[in-house]
Amino acid sequence: MSTPANILVVDDEMGIREGCRRVLAAEGYPIDLAEDGTVGLAKVQEKPYDLILVDLMMPGIGGLDLIQKIHEIDPEIILVVITGYATIETAVEATKRGAYDYLPKPFTPEALSVLVKRGLEKRELRLQALRLQEEREQRLLELAGERGRLRTIIGCMADGVLVTNLERQLVLWNASAVRMLKLSGADEPGRAIDHYLKNKPLLESLEHLLEAKDETVSMINQEIRTDDPSSVLMAQMAPVRDEQGRLLGAVTVLRDITTLKEIEKIKSQFVSMVAHELRAPLAAIEGWLGVVLSGEAGGSEEQNRNWLLRAKERANSLLALVQDLLEINKIEAGKVAQKMEAVQVTDIVAKVVELFKPEAERHHVSLQVKPSSPPPVQADVQDMEKLFTNLISNAIKYNVENGSVTIETSQDAHFVGVHIRDTGIGIAPADLPRLFDDFFRAETKKRDKVSGTGLGLTIAKKIVDSHLGHIEVESRVDKGSTFSVYLPYKK
């Protein structure tokens, strides 16, 4: 033992106590003495001991009872019985109570020394066994904790995870993989992966990966189609190897790229639509300028001016389109609703109406704002000006001769509403669901006479959405339209 063992001698005979003390102290052991069982038990309760010599026949607490009580305090203490009445019965009973061995009186110093050394060796072996058991339990606890953490992490992942061994058994998976691949029988662990998975391309790729014993195949990336035709998965498969490079199995990570595919498709459609919208005005500008430069206009200054004015109109529409595209890009980049402050929407509406009065007069349309005092909303002033500019401009342009535009507000428990009503040409019911789509312009009898990019209402909706509001429209052909903007306010 690294430190001297503490030994206690409990015996009612002073000669035995002193004899044991002299023998054992000479060998370097710290020795304590107790004249009876009561004193011995008190010492055990106060101080830890490695070995205790106990006499069987003592007044008060007897040796067998003392052995049992000490064993209850510390079962690893080595207890040696010393007695002048050594019999097989007493030895068996002492062993049952927790004694290690017994030493009959009288005994020689050599016998005492040998028995004590053997007992202390037994004590050391017991302590080592306890330490090893504790270390093993701690490692098992840490291993269980690591497994639990690993399963928790994998279970919380949005990506699907599948782990297979060389026997093609599915040994680890998560709920995302079950959902993405619709695995059957996932509650039966340890079976071959083709029992759970029916996706042939994925099974073939896994088989190819597990058959590659060398390190030539490091990873396989593959798009996977599931039973749902609208769902697309990206599967990344990699081998699992030990420190010596031996193949142990394969791990597959599944990512749902359906949304990315849809974004790519929308992006492609958007680019095509933009190219189409840009090509028409550019072709018109090139045509008008070509006529003037070629001299085919007849040389009349007035006629040349007319061609150039037409080219200028198309250039202006082209600039308006570019400006709207930049505005949409700005909104999509999050550069909207940046300077939020308490805004009175009626003040912004009044400002925009004042700017559009000349245009309304040219179109013979009356503008009317009904007075009201709704609570202020948290909004970006510039965004609100763009929003109501688009809506009021449309209400004027698509109105009828001697028509009117009426603007009023409302208020409910959560929103301030701004309602822009016109007496214009209206919108067909079939066109209403697509009204806020990019480049969409409803088929009306005034469409060709009114210039526009088809992005104004798209911008308006994106602005409203960025302010956590919503926009609604009600319309009847030849009866007019009502655009309602609802913006949240703080109570």
Image (cartoon, rainbow, N blue to C red):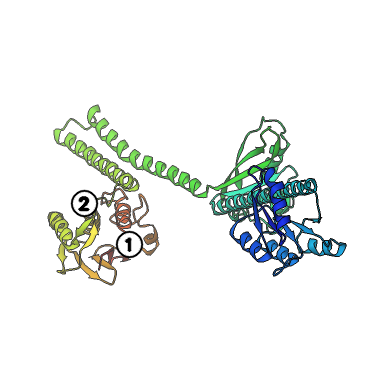
Question: For the point 69% across and 43% down, which residue is it?
Answer: 26
Mark earlier in primary sequence (2, 1): 2
Circle 1: element type:
strand
Q: Position of residue 237 (x, y in %)?
A: 62, 41
Q: Is residue 248 above or below residue 393?
A: above
Q: Position of residue 69 (x, y in %)?
A: 69, 65
Q: Position of residue 206 (x, y in %)?
A: 68, 42
Question: For the point 17% across and 58% down, which residue is it?
Answer: 348
- Who is closer to the viewer here, 252 or 134? 134
- Who is closer to the viewer here, 300 or 9? 9
Q: CA distance from mark 2 to mark 1?
A: 18 Å
- Who is closer to the viewer here, 231 or 25? 25
Q: Position of residue 253 (x, y in %)?
A: 59, 45
Q: Which residue is mark 2?
A: 382
The amino acid at mark 2 is: Gln
Q: Quadrant of residue 380?
A: bottom left
Please say whether residue 452 is visible from this viewpoint.
yes
Residue 470: which disc? 1
Q: Residue furthest bottom?
A: 413
The amino acid at mark 1 is: His
Mark 2 Cα-neighbour bin, 10 Å: few <14, some 14–19, many ≥20: few
Residue 270: which disc? none
Q: Are marks 2 and 1 in contact (CB under 8 Å)?
A: no
Q: Seen in the image, is 326 located left or right of residue 212? A: left
